[in-house]
Image (cartoon, helix red, strand yellow):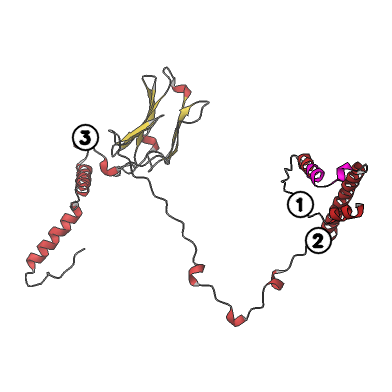
């Protein structure tokens, strides 16, 4: 009977073991494994169970140590061989080599960034900022800088050059520091303190027939077509300058309304006069720029 029972134990069908290993808790996995072994076999009932398990652990550690040694020896003894690109690429027929396309030889053109739209100027045809403001007419630009009340002129630094302005308080970062939109006449420029709380800088333009789009480089640009000259001061100008200013103002109004400028009107009048003087010529199919 004992022989029959042993044969039945040997022929006992295998039972699948299902469990997942949590790397942070490997002992939990072993506990499940021992519970399964205790249910499905008599290994844990044997007197030599602890020795057999310890021997299995020792053998497993030895196999792991040997595997780590072999891995380290491979990394140190056998360096990684880099295959040359010439060997890895198949041979090419020189007749089949494609010439680079002309398009690929063209340099890439940088994308144009969208320019910000011009800003409507303030009442003085300039702009107002947090630390200063500026206004202009055709002849001059005035920069106004608020300062602490009671500030003396000796505490102010102001450098006016042909193409640059630098204004601030001594020992502090400049309030205004940058290049002009256009050149000024340094000898005809000056600054003063008004009511001991405002620095006023008067700049005389070199080109007195052009509106500035900004005072100092880096500022937003104003829309010079929205500039409104003081008509009351036109009488102070000499006849030639006054005529030019009135022409400029007329052209700006015409452009805003989508109408021809004074130069365009003059050309149209000349063409009409020419056509009236030459009635024998046919202008029906003529194109005029």
Q: Is residue 122 left or right of residue 52?
A: left
Q: Main secondary structure of the magenta part?
A: helix
Q: Secondary structure at mark 1?
A: loop
Can you identify the residue that label 2 sits on?
79
Which residue is drawn at the image coordinates 16% and 69% (left, top)?
Answer: 286
- For label 1, the residue is 15
Q: Give the residue at the far front of this rendering.
A: 1
Judge whether residue 38 is colored magenta: yes
Please name which of the two marks, 2 or 3, marks the residue nearer to the observer.
Answer: 2
Q: Which mark is residue 233?
A: 3
Mark carried by residue 24? none
Judging depth in this view, the residue of 20 and 255 nearest the camera is 20
Q: Position of residue 44 (x, y in %)?
A: 86, 42
Could you give the CA–CA distance between mark 2 and mark 3, rounded to whole angstroms?
A: 88 Å
Residue sitting at 37 percent across and 45 percent down? 116
- Quarter-of-image position of residue 198: top left
Looking at marks 3 and 1 on the same chain, the residue that comes earlier in the sequence is marked by 1
Residue 262: percent from left, percent from top? 18, 52
């Amino acid at each position: 009977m004992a022989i029959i029972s042993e044969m039945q134990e040997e022929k006992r069908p295998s039972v699948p073991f299902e469990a997942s290993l949590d790397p942070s808790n490997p002992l939990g996995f072993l506990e499940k494994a021992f519970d399964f072994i205790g249910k499905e076999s008599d290994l844990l009932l044997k007197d030599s169970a602890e020795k057999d398990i310890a021997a299995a652990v020792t053998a497993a550690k030895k196999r792991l140590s040997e595997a780590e040694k072999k891995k380290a020896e491979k990394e140190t003894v056998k360096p990684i061989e880099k295959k040359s690109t010439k060997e890895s690429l198949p041979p090419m027929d020189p007749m089949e080599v494609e010439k680079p396309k002309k398009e690929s030889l063209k340099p890439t053109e940088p994308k144009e960034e969208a320019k910000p739209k011009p800003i409507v100027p303030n009442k003085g045809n300039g702009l107002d900022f947090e630390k200063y403001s500026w206004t202009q007419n055709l002849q001059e630009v005035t920069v106004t800088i608020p300062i602490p009340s009671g500030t003396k002129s000796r505490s102010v630094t102001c450098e006016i050059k042909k193409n640059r302005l630098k204004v601030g308080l001594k020992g502090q970062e400049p309030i205004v520091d940058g290049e002009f939109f256009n050149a000024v006449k340094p000898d005809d420029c000056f600054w003063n303190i008004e009511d001991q709380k405002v620095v006023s800088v008067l700049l005389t333009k070199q080109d007195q027939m052009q509106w500035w789009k900004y005072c100092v480089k880096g500022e937003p640009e104003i829309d010079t077509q929205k500039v409104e000259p003081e008509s009351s001061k036109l009488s102070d100008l000499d006849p030639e300058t006054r005529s030019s200013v009135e022409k400029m103002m007329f052209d700006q109004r015409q452009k805003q309304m989508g109408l021809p400028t004074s130069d365009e009107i003059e050309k149209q009048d000349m063409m009409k006069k020419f056509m009236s003087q030459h009635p024998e010529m046919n202008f029906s199919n003529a194109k005029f720029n």
